[in-house]
Amino acid sequence: MLKKIALFFVLSIASATVALAANYIEPQELKELFDKKKPVILVDIQPATDFEVQHLPGSIETNAFPAKTDEEKARLDKALTVIKASKDPVVVVCPRGKSGAKNSYQYLESKGVPEDRMQILEGGIAEWPFKELFVKGR
């Protein structure tokens, strides 16, 4: 019985990891959306100073990074209005596309944004290869 319970937990954790891992978007894929002028909601969680230096065009500035505390997560609420008024896909943009992005993703999901609409930018701003697309300032 103990082995069955342990196996259940291992499989549950593995499937949750796989589900979240499947919700990443590669930079090239996002650029193709830009090139085709496909609508996409970019939820940028970078700190304010980083956002001012560089961000992707059309990004919603939330300054929620690392989205650990309730106060940081609440900063994502300004994006919720836009997200809920649309059916467009949502991409969470983080400094590196890791824990802050996952925290934000989970928070947005907890607020009713369906997983099938959300993705995380793989590698975040740090690994975005199309630097010519960056916007400076606000």
Image (cartoon, rainbow, N blue to C red):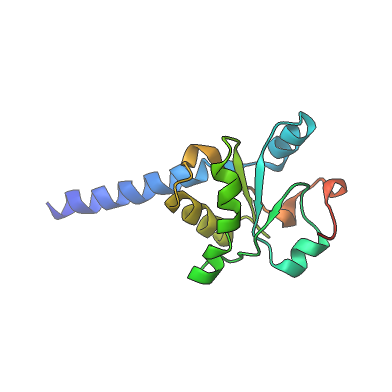
Q: Is residue 67 above or below residue 93?
A: below
Residue at point 76%, 36% (across, down): 34
Residue 84 in the figure: left or right of residue 30: left
Residue at point 72%, 50% (across, down): 59
Residue 136 in the figure: left or right of residue 6: right
Residue 64 drawn at (x, y percent): 61, 64
From the viewer's side, name the closer residue of 113 and 26.
113
Residue at point 72%, 33% (across, down): 33
**Location of residue 63 (image quadrant):** bottom right
The answer to whether any part of residue 119 appears in the image is no
Quadrant for the C terminus, please.
Answer: bottom right
Residue 11 drawn at (x, y percent): 31, 46
Q: Is residue 42 above or below residue 78?
A: above
Labels in figure, total: 0
Residue at point 25%, 48% (across, down): 8
Q: Is residue 133 above or below residue 29?
A: below
The answer to whether any part of residue 95 appears in the image is yes
The residue sitting at the left extreme is: 1
Residue 28 in the figure: left or right of residue 132: left
From the viewer's side, name the closer residue of 135 and 14.
135
The residue sitting at the top extreme is: 36
From the viewer's side, name the closer residue of 107 and 77.
77
Residue 44 drawn at (x, y percent): 67, 55
